[in-house]
Amino acid sequence: MVNAGRVVCITTPFLLTIGALLCLILVFLAGSIDRSSTLDSLYFAKLDLSNFTTTASANLAGGTTGANLSVLGGALEAAKQQLNMYDYYTLYLRGYCGWNGDDLYANCSSPQTIFWFDAISIWGLDSNTTGTEIEDLLPSSLRTGLNTYEKVSKAMSIMYIVAVASTAATVLVGISAIFSRWGSFATTIFAAASSIFTLVASVVATALFFTMKGMLNETLEEDYGIRADVGNKGYIVTWVATAFAVGAGLFWLLSVCCCSGR
C-alpha cells in the first residue's frame, strides 16, 4: 500500500525533474522547425552577415596577411553571390537556421546528434578555385579558436545527451521512490548524474559561445562586417533546466532520509 506521506515527500523532486526534462527537450528541439518563433528563438549564437563586405580586406597593403585576407574575402564574396550564405544564421545545439531579410528562422538544417557549425563546408568555401586551403588563409588565432570550437561543441553535445538520458531515467526510476527510501536512493544516483551533466553542459555552452562571440567580432567584424551575438532565451532555458535538475537532486537526497514508506 502506498503511504500518502511518502507521495507528498517525493512530489517536489518529481515535479522538478519533469521540469528539467521539459527544458532540456526544448533545447534539443530548438532550430529543428522552420519559422517556429517559439522554438527557433532559443538559439545560443547568431551571425549577422547583412553588412558583409570585402572592401577593407581588398584594399589592404601588400604582404602575406593582406594577400590572405584578400583571397579569403574573394572566396566569401563568391559564396555570397552563389547564395551559399544567408544574411543571418542562428546556431543551436543540433543545427542552425539561415535566412535573408525578415524571413525569420527559415532554412533550418536537419538536426544532428553531434553538431558544430562548420562554416567552411556550409558556405561552400571548401570548393574554392584559388588552389589554397581556406583554413590556411585564416588568422592563426581564429584558426585555433575554430578548432577548439569544433572539439568543445562535440563534447557539449554528448553532455546534453547524457543529461537528457539521466533526467529521463530519474523520472522513470523515481516511480519506485513512492514505495520506499531505497527507491529514493536509486533515484538519487540518476538525479546526481542529471544535475552534474546538465550543469556542466550549461556552463560549457555559455562559456563556448560567449568566447566565440568575442573572437569572431575581433577578427571578422572590422574586415568583413560579419558580427556575432549570443541569444538570451536559449541560455535562460538551459539554466532553468540546471536549476530544476540541481534542486531535484537535493530533494531526492532528502527523500532518502525522510518520509518512510511504512
Image (cartoon, rainbow, N blue to C red):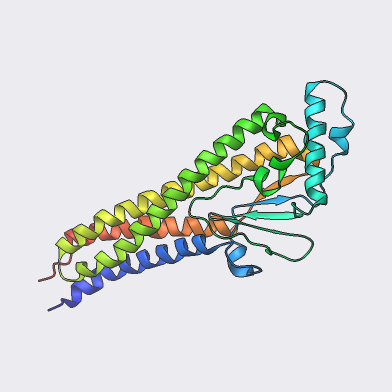
Q: Residue 196 location in percent, x, y? A: 36, 49
Q: Residue 170 location in percent, x, y? A: 30, 62
Q: Name the foreground residue: 82 vs 129.
A: 129
Question: Residue at coordinates 50% horizontally, 64% vertically from top-left?
Answer: 26
Q: Residue furthest top?
A: 63
Where is 68 relative to 258, above or below? above
Residue 207: image quadrant is: top right
Q: Residue 83 location in percent, x, y? A: 78, 54
Total marks in image = 0
Residue 13: image quadrant is: bottom left
Q: Name the foreground residue: 62 vs 132.
A: 132
Q: Residue furthest left?
A: 262
Question: Residue at coordinates 79% horizontally, 31% vertically from top-left?
Answer: 69
Side of 203 where 117 appears, left or right = right
Where is 189 relative to 15, above or below? above
Q: Residue 48 location in percent, x, y? A: 74, 51
Where is 49 relative to 11, above or below? above
